[in-house]
Image (cartoon, helix red, strand yellow):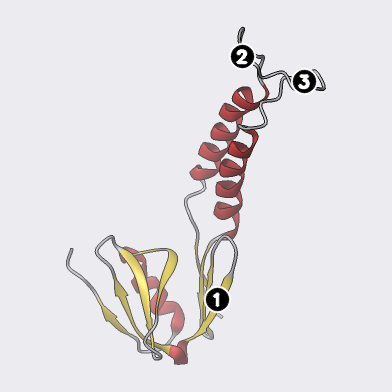
Amino acid sequence: MNRVRFRPHQSILIAAFIAFVGVLPIAFGPSIPGDNALTDDGSNVRWIFVPLLLIPIAVFVWVLRSGTDADASGLRVRGLLGTKRIPWSQIRELATDDRGRAVVLLRDGYAVTLSSVRRDDVGRLVEASGHGIVWQQNER
């Protein structure tokens, strides 16, 4: 079975790690003179900035989890929080939007953007399907 996997670029993991390390001194660093960051228990954690750590963690999880898998049975589109399985029989056509992202137009009228699939990748996607799928290629 021919399976094609599309994933976000792994260098985003490095950026997420750098962002995480960059937020640590803001949330847990030493207090500034005149700053009332000391809490009642004597620690100098600035709790208001701790939620900022969730942003690079979410990006890290998104890069590890999201993407699109294509094989002869259909597509599996994964995002940060969910997964959608789309059999080839439900797909009417493939298209690309103005930003170069691949979009699947379903027979029920809905459109699903394929995570991590770009205009140049659609040919590989169609090849993995083993089906004759109409591909509406925009010239932009």
Residue 81 in percent (x, y) is at: 60, 63
Q: Nearer the viewer, mark 2 or mark 1?
A: 2
Give the residue at mark 1: 84
Which of pointers 3 and 2 lies earlier in the amino acid sequence? 2
Give the residue at mark 3: 43
Give the residue at mark 2: 35
Residue type, label 1: Lys
Residue 16 in percent (x, y) is at: 55, 40
Residue 95 in percent (x, y) is at: 30, 75
117 sits to left or right of 71: left
Which quarter of the figure has residue 103?
bottom left
Q: Nearer the viewer, mark 3 or mark 1?
A: 3
Residue type, label 3: Ser
Q: CA–CA distance between discs 3 and 2?
A: 13 Å
Residue 101, placed above or below residue 51: below
Q: Secondary structure at mark 1?
A: strand
Q: Secondary structure at mark 2?
A: loop
The 10 Å Cα crowd at callout 3, few under 14, some 14 to 19, many 20 or more, is few
